[in-house]
């Protein structure tokens, strides 16, 4: 009796093992088959937006041999620049006056006592940081008016460029993701139609890669926001 029970139990275990093995094999075959019924596509969304923040370093220089006199001249120039900005709608909290930078030209390795008419070069930088992008742009276009007051604003060059930013990106992100996924769906639907099938559901999708760039070199205040996402759809006959 006991031997019969052992035999029955052993047979049952073998049967269960065969069933489990069959299920695993079937699942594996289904997985392999489904790989041939998937499509991975890229979804793209682009949008042009206006910058909502600007940083403008206003650079002026003064040459001379008498440091106290140079500092006095720089202070006068800074006061004139600040007054000009405030007359044109820039508030005190948007203006930062940095400490003057003094360069001793005679102390430089390549300098000679005969080559420099002036010993000191004093650089002043007043930084305007504002959300009033259009207003600041209009002031930049009229900065030549300062020449009438004896103030020459020089090009900031590589180290002190005018920088435009788009900071409201988080508000735009969900809408652009939705548009990118819609674009991916259209691409997948076209692929499915060409292969005589239909898209079924999303198997997986990534967060998308966002980039913010200047639209072109001449309009850095216009930004191009771009997102590319990858989406995998299952297909059905």
Image (cartoon, helix red, strand yellow):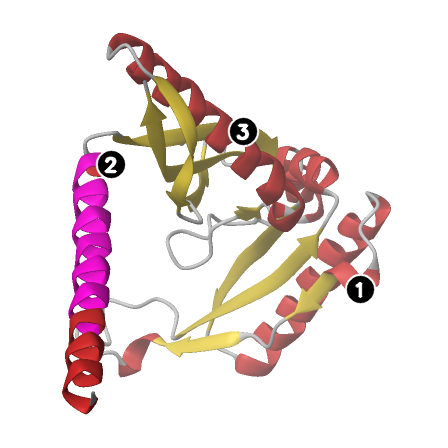
Residue 155's mark? Answer: none
In this rendering, the answer to whether 155 lies above or below 10 is: above
Q: Is residue 143 magenta?
A: no
Marks 1 and 3, Cα distance to the nearest angstrom?
A: 38 Å
Q: Quadrant of the C terminus?
A: top left
Along the line of sight, which residue is nearer the eye, 150 or 191? 191
Q: Relative to 150, is 184 on the left or the right? A: left
Which residue: 56% across, 74% down? Answer: 100
Q: Is residue 18 magenta?
A: yes
Residue 93's mark? Answer: 1
Marks 1 and 2, Cα distance to the nearest angstrom?
A: 61 Å
**Mark 2 lies on residue:** 34
Q: Relative to 213, is 25 on the left or the right? A: left
| Range of magenta residues | 13-33
**Mark 3 lies on residue:** 179
Which residue: 69% across, 67% down? Answer: 96
């Amino acid at each position: 009796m006991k031997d019969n029970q052992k035999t029955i139990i052993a047979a049952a275990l073998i049967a269960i093992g065969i069933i489990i093995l069959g299920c695993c094999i079937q699942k594996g075959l289904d997985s392999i088959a489904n790989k041939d019924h998937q499509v991975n596509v890229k979804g793209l969304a682009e949008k042009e937006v206006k910058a909502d923040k600007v940083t403008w370093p206003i650079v002026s220089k003064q040459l001379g041999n008498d440091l106290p006199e140079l500092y006095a001249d720089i202070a006068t120039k800074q006061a004139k620049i600040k007054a000009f900005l405030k007359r044109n709608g820039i508030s005190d909290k948007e203006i930062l006056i940095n400490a003057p930078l003094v360069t001793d030209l005679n102390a430089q390795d390549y300098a000679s006592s005969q080559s420099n008419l002036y010993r000191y070069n004093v650089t002043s930088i007043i930084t305007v940081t504002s959300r009033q992008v259009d207003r600041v742009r209009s002031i930049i276009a009229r900065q030549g008016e300062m020449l009438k007051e004896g103030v020459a604003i020089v090009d900031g060059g590589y180290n002190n460029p005018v920088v435009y930013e788009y900071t409201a990106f988080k508000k735009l992100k969900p809408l652009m993701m939705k548009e990118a996924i819609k674009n991916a769906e259209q691409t997948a639907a076209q692929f499915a139609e060409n292969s005589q099938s239909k898209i079924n559901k999303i198997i997986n999708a990534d967060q998308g890669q966002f980039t913010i760039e200047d639209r072109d070199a001449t309009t850095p205040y216009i930004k191009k926001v771009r997102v590319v996402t990858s989406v995998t759809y299952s297909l059905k006959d």
